Image (spheres, helix red, strand yellow):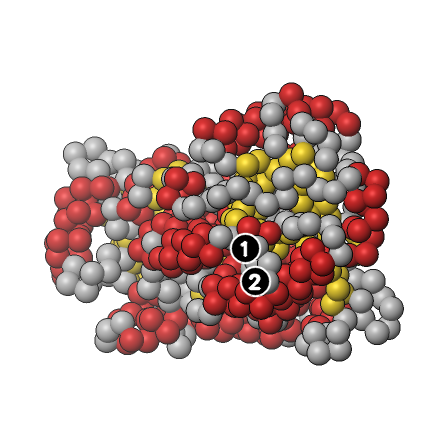
């Protein structure tokens, strides 16, 4: 570990054509305890001076007559054998910062100079430089810093957090830990490819750095997760809130990756030393729990740790424990939500929806237990049970004289990826003696695109069985629409987010109409889910949507109640697709 004395004795060169700026920087550095500071107002002398003295850090003005800072950077890069140019640029032009970083500068200091910013950035860069030199190579550096982004690693972040919390603090000073995680990064990375995923991470890191001030450290933890260490001295326990919001807002601005303009979102979890804990490990755990809370509500949001967050984490653990034995205890049941033909008003088919009825009688909404099934992998055996149960129920309805009722089943991306998935579906159909076209397999757009290498094979095998394939939550994915022509898809389900405000939001209405028209051209069926009002139905009928599903027509029903629906609405028409 680099000590304070080594940092104070580091050799620093100031390069600025303004003598006033040179004097100001020398005064700041001298006041901070630096003992080996040199300067020059002649940029053409920099290379010779560097060869002679091997400075640990160069503070380089970008706009100088005769030879600007970018030219100096190029000459330094040509003679630096270690591939690390120890330059911090000085500029008042925001547009020059990213250009300088791309040219090889390690950091920047804004003009006019802020004392805290100057000292903090110089100390951070000197620690990197001296650590690199001490390691005699990159091995130790790689333990402390992330190779892809150049940011501190998780290990180094934790060391800095421990050191900071151990220092005496003023009564109003506090340390905030923010954990930042890109939403659905795996989907984006799988679509763009691993290399472009790395480019995206680097671009995100640069964007996040520009949001942070001098008393802030950002590190890359792993994959698409970052840690932020924020020091404030205003006594406000929610001082991290505007920083979190600024980072999220900045990521919504498009990032260019391999010709694609991507707007990404992030979830942020925060914990504060003065209200949560002054122990580093505890702060990290609490921030992680807050991050989980942010993800639980759908991402693209931020949450502080609180006693309520902790209680919810314990509740989630208890829920997971209970779910692990639910299948063996026969606690899962299926309800069926009918779908209606828009043109005739007859019901057309149904969707099987999973419900959990634990022995204690507590009703747990699917929005709470299904994410846990996904996270733990329990969704695979439960999903297998759903397919087998649905096929058995279709056969029972047929024996009861109701005809061949077509039922859709939601299939998790994890279940879809199982090697024996197609064989499992084939067995469930054949063992119950039902027509294959009475089973619809619904898979979300994001799950479909996350397995582009295997998707085509699985979908075509399902089609060979005669199973129908639907894309659920259509319109919410990152993906290109080219897969609609590539894959054998029968049905698109317009996501409920576009239906909810169909008659009040022009954008949602336009998207719904576009999806309907696109499906018509591709000869696919369109289903609108979440229809709750007559105006929504009228809109969808006007624009020739095929089917609807939602509480306006019927809520999800137990299997025996679906039988009584036939007495009110008539036996389902056109239940099995032709061909």
Q: Residue at x 73, y 31 (%)?
A: 345
Q: Quadrant of the N terminus?
A: bottom left
Residue 267 visible in image:
no
Q: Which of pointers 2 and 1 lies earlier in the amino acid sequence?
A: 2
Disc 2 designates what residue? 429
Using a 10 Å C-alpha cutoff, classify the residue at mark 2 as few (fewer than 14 neighbours), some (14 to 19) or many (20 or more): many
- Label 2: which secondary element: helix
- Check whether the beta carbons of the residues at disc 2 and disc 1 lie within 8 A of each other: yes
The answer to whether residue 362 is above or below residue 494 is below
Using a 10 Å C-alpha cutoff, classify the residue at mark 1 as few (fewer than 14 neighbours), some (14 to 19) or many (20 or more): many
The answer to whether residue 472 is above or below residue 5 is above
Where residue 222 sits, quadrant-wise, is bottom left
Disc 1 designates what residue? 436
- Label 1: which secondary element: helix
Q: Residue at x 83, y 62 (%)?
A: 363
The percent position of residue 522, horizontal first and vertical second, equals: 44, 33
Camera-nearest residue between 47 and 289: 289
Where residue 254 sits, quadrant-wise, is top left
The percent position of residue 380, horizontal first and vertical second, equals: 57, 68
The percent position of residue 24, horizontal first and vertical second, equals: 39, 46
């Amino acid at each position: 570990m680099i000590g304070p004395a080594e940092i104070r004795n580091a050799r620093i060169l100031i390069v600025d054509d303004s003598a006033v700026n040179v004097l100001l920087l020398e005064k700041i550095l001298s006041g901070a305890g630096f003992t080996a500071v040199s300067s020059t107002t002649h940029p053409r002398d920099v290379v010779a001076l560097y060869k002679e003295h091997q400075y640990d850090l160069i503070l380089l003005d970008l706009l100088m007559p005769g030879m600007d800072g970018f030219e100096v950077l190029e000459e330094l890069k040509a003679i630096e054998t270690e591939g690390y140019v120890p330059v911090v640029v000085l500029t008042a032009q925001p547009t020059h910062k990213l250009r300088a970083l791309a040219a090889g500068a390690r950091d920047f200091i804004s003009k006019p100079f802020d004392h805290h910013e100057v000292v903090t950035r110089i100390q951070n860069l000197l620690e990197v430089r001296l650590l690199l030199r001490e390691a005699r190579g990159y091995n130790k550096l790689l333990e402390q810093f992330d190779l892809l982004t150049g940011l501190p690693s998780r290990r180094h972040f934790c060391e800095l957090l421990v050191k900071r919390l151990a220092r005496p603090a003023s009564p109003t000073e506090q340390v905030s830990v923010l954990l930042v995680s890109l939403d659905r990064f795996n989907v984006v990375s799988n679509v763009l490819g691993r290399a472009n995923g790395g480019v995206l991470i680097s671009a995100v890191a640069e964007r996040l750095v520009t949001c942070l001030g001098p008393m802030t450290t950002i590190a890359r933890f792993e994959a698409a997760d970052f840690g932020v260490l924020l020091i404030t001295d205003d006594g406000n326990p929610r001082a991290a809130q505007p920083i979190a919001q600024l980072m999220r807002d900045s990521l919504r601005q498009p990032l260019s990756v391999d010709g694609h303009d991507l707007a990404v979102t992030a979830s942020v979890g925060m914990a504060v030393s003065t209200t949560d804990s002054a122990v580093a490990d505890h702060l990290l755990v609490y921030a992680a729990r807050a991050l989980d809370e942010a993800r639980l509500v759908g991402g693209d949001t931020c949450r502080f740790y609180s006693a309520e967050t902790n209680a919810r984490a314990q509740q989630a653990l208890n829920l997971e424990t209970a779910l692990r034995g639910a299948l063996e205890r026969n606690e899962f049941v299926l309800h069926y939500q009918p779908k209606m033909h828009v043109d005739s008003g007859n019901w057309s088919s149904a969707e099987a929806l999973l419900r959990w009825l634990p022995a204690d009688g507590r009703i747990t909404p699917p929005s709470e237990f299904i994410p846990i099934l996904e996270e733990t992998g329990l969704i695979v055996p439960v999903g297998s049970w759903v397919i087998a149960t649905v096929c058995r129920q279709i056969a029972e309805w047929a024996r009861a004289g109701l005809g061949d009722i077509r039922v859709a089943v939601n299939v998790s991306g994890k279940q879809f990826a199982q090697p024996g998935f197609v064989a499992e579906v084939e067995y469930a159909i054949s063992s119950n003696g039902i027509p294959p076209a009475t089973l619809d397999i619904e898979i979300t757009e994001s799950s479909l695109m996350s397995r582009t290498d295997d998707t085509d094979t699985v979908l075509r095998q399902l089609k060979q069985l005669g199973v129908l394939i639907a894309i659920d939550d259509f319109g919410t994915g990152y993906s290109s629409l080219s897969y609609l022509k590539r894959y054998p898809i029968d049905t698109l389900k317009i996501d409920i987010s576009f239906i909810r405000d169909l008659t009040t939001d022009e954008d949602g209405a336009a998207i719904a109409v576009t999806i309907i028209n696109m499906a018509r051209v591709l000869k696919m069926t369109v289903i609108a889910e979440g229809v709750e009002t007559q105006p929504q139905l009228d809109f969808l009928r006007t624009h020739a949507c095929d089917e609807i599903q939602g509480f306006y027509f019927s809520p999800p029903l137990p299997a025996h109640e679906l039988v009584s629906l036939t007495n009110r609405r008539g036996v389902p028409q056109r239940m099995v697709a032709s061909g």
